[in-house]
Image: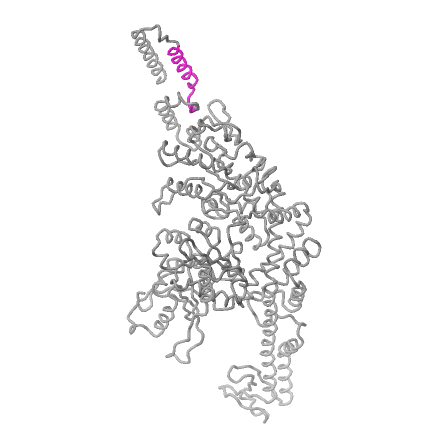
């Protein structure tokens, strides 16, 4: 840290540096009066990040923000992946030579904030701990806002796919492994989040076991189905250490650990999640134009989070899938009930996150009102349907406790209270008789004082008298000099002024004590009542979290039914094994952006062959067809209706997609290298129960190499037996033995010198890729199109003449004439009788043909 020598610093700056030394990883907000100030490197960095004016104090860099506006600046820093330590001024100095007492009262980080204003209500907020153990990684991840805590083992191939499937705000790594493994460090840094580097001792399995047992208050990790020597305890221990260091408060929202394994889930690698644009798009990485945005009709933030979770983690348990589908069908069939549920959900709040605030003692008054309103909506909702009651009885052991809590909150808490605790504005009148009495005394103080003043005037004969209050002497009666001779003997002099004197009386002192005591006792009593009700709510935080979970599920199911009905989705049929059969399937995102009648539906059935080799022009709809097939399979496994007329979906263990072109220039990786890495991952991990989507394998290298690689991968996947949609621009592959494959193409309609993409998948092989036509549509100048066409004819004529699929010429009017001339030349050659002709005859024929070709070329140039 750039700073002056210690003996040249002021006492205040030395105090700052002492505190900063304890918070090297955080931006330190140092309270000075009405500002939070930052100094040295913090000031330089924050002034740049927040566009603040950088000034200097005693030659040292400094910038500041008003304390009343700190929340907006704090949120911006958190969104940028920064930690912030809040250092408050706890007491004022008694004299100018003393320093105010200051200390850090709270540390904010992206993964440990729980306040609504700093959170994305529709996204999880996970902190992940990653530990490499010989052959695999042990990871633990927790969301402080919901109380979820997970552990799992993942292979090196899977690690970053798993991490990208989570909404991670921070990560904890073992520092030696992080710094010695370049690829690991590069991929971790690419996540763009805070990386907390811990020494190896924090990842001890034995210490982790003890930490887990203490943290969750259990005698053995066996209650979580975790062996005491399982390495996930090491990563869990490091995560718990970090949470306790950062939060310094109760973390009772964490009640259990869930062990996650890949069995039971349809696996998605990082490439597939990205290419299918499930949660974020490829353009600006926002949620627009994604599967989530296209199908999200949830009302609540918890419902939206659950939708994301199910899209990213589809299941392979048919019973669970069918249970989900039955709920969607329930809402799909009952429009009136769906409307009623949607209206009630609009009145509810996020009980899952509110319950975590209660556990951490960070709730605000408004949270209690939200609890009561949500519980009222919840019990109003479930009381009318037997199916809801069954769901409630499965989750809640004693719903009456929650009903009592809701009633108590309604009877006690002011419905107009805010997030700020304001004395006198929290507890309703009529709830507590003692509080009401104290408030009545406080409220009648003005009347009591006015009556007393009038009494004094009448008894003393004083005509000019003023009643006031002072922090030093309390209540007083101020008498001007001209009236001092009338002051009664029981008046007690307290203060002499230039124009008169101030007095008190035994009765006034007694009245003061009564009024001020009532105000103090009223505030104290109100706080006690509020604290007690908050405590009761906190005792039921687990039950509140369960209610929040039920509401999230109901919201998700009604959302799935809402989009299914509005966009004409159908209920899929899941089978353990068999053929994939999608009739008139549609891409849910593309369809969402078009008028429904404009979208051309396409079918796919693997009964003819599990392997489909697809050719077709650019822009004809190949990629859309490939992606929609994968999305329909994914939605079915998530337990949702699908955009199709009918869909029979076999259980699928993995979905792989190799589509689109991308590179990683920062790592020196070309498009071809990225493509080959993704393809290698697929061939290493695909099984006969996988769905593989591959689009245009072999780009970025020579035609011969690209075609050979595409052929080898095609052959491997065909022999593996997995359902594969393999799109290629190498039409030569269709000339091989494809008798056991489906040959599909996208229909093209020719109209004079133009073509139209019908976007309909049909049997067959594409006649051309129509690259020049696409270039024309893209705006390439006509002169360049003509030049490309001429070059094509001159350099690839022989290639086209002796291949089954010729490049259709759409940019000249002479194609049919040229073809006829070529046919004439071929006819003359074929008519030449070799057996009865002399060598001279053959030479004469060649000379004649050369002359004809030259004449035709001259005509073409004209």
Q: Which contiguous range is marked in magenta?
A: 806-830
Q: How many marks?
A: 0
Q: Is residue 329 magenta?
A: no
Quarter of the image where one finds residue 786: top left
Q: Quadrant of the C terminus?
A: top left
Q: Is residue 318 above or below residue 852?
A: below
At 52% from the left and 87% from the top, the residue drawn is 500
Q: x%, y% of residue 738?
A: 47, 29
Magenta residues, dominant SS class: helix
Outermost residue on the bottom side: it is 489
At which x and y percent is residue 768? 44, 27
Percent x, y for residue 120? 51, 56
State the residue in front, 226 or 461: 226
Relative to residue 37, is residue 444 drawn left or right?
right
Between 470 and 180, the residue placed more toward the observer is: 180
Query: Is residue 817 in the magenta section?
Result: yes
Q: Nearer the viewer, residue 515 or 397?
A: 397
Q: Nearer the viewer, residue 638 or 524?
A: 638
């Amino acid at each position: 840290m750039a700073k002056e020598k210690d003996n040249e610093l002021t006492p205040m700056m030395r105090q700052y540096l002492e505190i900063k030394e304890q918070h090297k990883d955080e931006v330190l907000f140092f309270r000075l009066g009405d500002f939070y100030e930052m100094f040295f490197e913090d000031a330089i960095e924050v002034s740049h990040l927040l566009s603040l004016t950088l000034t200097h104090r005693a030659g040292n860099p400094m910038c500041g923000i008003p304390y009343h506006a700190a929340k907006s600046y704090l949120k911006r820093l958190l969104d940028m992946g920064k930690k912030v330590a809040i250092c408050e001024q706890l007491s004022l100095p008694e004299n100018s030579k003393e320093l105010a007492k200051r200390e850090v009262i709270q540390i904010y980080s992206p993964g440990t904030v729980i306040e609504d204003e700093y959170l994305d209500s529709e996204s999880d907020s996970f902190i992940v701990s990653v530990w490499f153990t010989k052959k695999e990684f042990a990871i633990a991840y927790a969301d402080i806002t919901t109380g979820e805590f997970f552990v799992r083992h993942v292979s090196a191939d899977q690690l970053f796919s798993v991490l990208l499937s989570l909404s991670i705000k921070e990560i904890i790594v073992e520092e030696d492994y992080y710094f010695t493994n370049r690829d690991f460090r590069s991929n971790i840094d690419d996540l763009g989040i805070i990386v907390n580097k811990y020494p190896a001792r924090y990842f001890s399995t034995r210490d982790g076991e003890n930490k887990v047992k203490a943290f969750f208050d259990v005698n053995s990790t066996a209650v979580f189905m975790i062996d005491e020597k399982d390495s996930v305890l090491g990563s869990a221990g490091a995560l718990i250490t970090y949470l306790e260091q950062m939060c310094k408060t109760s973390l009772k929202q964490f009640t259990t650990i869930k062990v996650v394994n890949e069995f039971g889930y349809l696996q998605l690698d990082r490439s597939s999640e990205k290419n299918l644009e499930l949660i974020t798009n490829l353009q600006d990485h926002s949620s627009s134009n994604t599967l989530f945005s296209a199908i999200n009709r949830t009302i609540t933030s918890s419902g939206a989070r659950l939708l994301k979770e199910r899209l990213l983690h589809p299941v392979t348990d048919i019973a669970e899938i069918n249970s989900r589908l039955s709920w969607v069908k329930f809402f799909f069939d009952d429009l009136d009930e769906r409307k009623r549920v949607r209206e009630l959900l609009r009145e509810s709040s996020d009980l899952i996150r509110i319950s975590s605030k209660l556990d951490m003692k960070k709730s605000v008054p408004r949270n209690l009102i939200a609890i009561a309103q949500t519980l009222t909506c919840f019990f109003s909702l479930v009381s009318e349907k037997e199916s809801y009651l069954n769901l409630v009885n499965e989750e809640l052991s004693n719903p009456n406790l929650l009903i009592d809590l809701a009633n108590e909150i309604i009877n006690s808490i002011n419905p107009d209270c805010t997030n700020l605790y304001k004395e006198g504005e929290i507890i309703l009148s009529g709830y507590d008789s003692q509080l009401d009495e104290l408030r009545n005394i406080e409220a009648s103080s003005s009347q009591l004082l006015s009556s007393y003043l009038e009494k004094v005037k009448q008894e003393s004969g004083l005509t000019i008298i003023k009643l006031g209050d002072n922090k030093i002497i309390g209540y007083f009666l101020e008498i001007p000099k001209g009236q001092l001779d009338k002051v009664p003997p029981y008046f007690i002099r307290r203060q002499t002024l230039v124009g008169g004197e101030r007095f008190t009386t035994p009765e006034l002192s007694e009245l003061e004590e009564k009024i001020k005591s009532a105000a103090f006792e009223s505030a104290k009593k109100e706080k006690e009542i509020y604290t007690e009700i908050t405590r009761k709510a906190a005792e039921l935080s687990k039950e509140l979290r369960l209610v929040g979970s039920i509401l999230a599920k109901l919201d998700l199911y009604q959302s799935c039914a809402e989009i299914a009905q509005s966009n004409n989705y159908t209920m899929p049929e899941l089978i353990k094994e068999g053929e994939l059969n999608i009739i008139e399937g549609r891409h849910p995102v593309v369809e969402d952006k078009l008028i429904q009648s404009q979208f051309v539906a396409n079918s796919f059935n693997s009964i003819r062959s599990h392997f489909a080799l697809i050719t077709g022009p650019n822009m004809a709809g190949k990629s859309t067809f490939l992606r929609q097939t994968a999305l329909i399979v994914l939605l079915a496994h998530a337990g949702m209706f699908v955009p199709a007329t009918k869909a029979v979906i076999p259980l699928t263990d993995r979905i792989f997609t190799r589509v689109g072109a991308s590179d990683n220039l920062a790592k020196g990786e070309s498009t071809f290298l990225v493509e080959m890495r993704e393809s290698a991952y697929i061939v290493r991990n695909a099984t006969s129960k996988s769905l593989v989507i591959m689009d245009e394998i072999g780009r970025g290298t020579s035609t011969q190499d690209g075609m050979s690689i595409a052929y080898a991968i095609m052959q491997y996947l065909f022999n593996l037996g997995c359902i594969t949609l393999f799109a290629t621009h190498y039409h030569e592959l269709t000339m091989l033995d494809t008798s056991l494959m489906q040959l599909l193409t996208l229909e093209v309609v020719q109209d004079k010198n133009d073509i139209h993409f019908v976007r309909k998948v049909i049997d067959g092989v594409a006649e051309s890729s129509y690259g020049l036509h696409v270039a024309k549509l893209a705006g390439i100048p006509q002169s360049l199109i003509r030049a490309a066409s001429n070059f094509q004819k001159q350099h690839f004529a022989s290639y086209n003449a002796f291949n089954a699929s010729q490049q259709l010429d759409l940019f000249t009017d002479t194609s049919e004439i040229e073809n006829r001339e070529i046919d004439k030349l071929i006819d003359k050659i074929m008519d030449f009788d070799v057996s009865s002709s002399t060598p001279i005859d053959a030479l004469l024929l060649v000379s004649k043909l050369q002359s004809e070709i030259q004449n035709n070329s001259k005509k073409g140039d004209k």
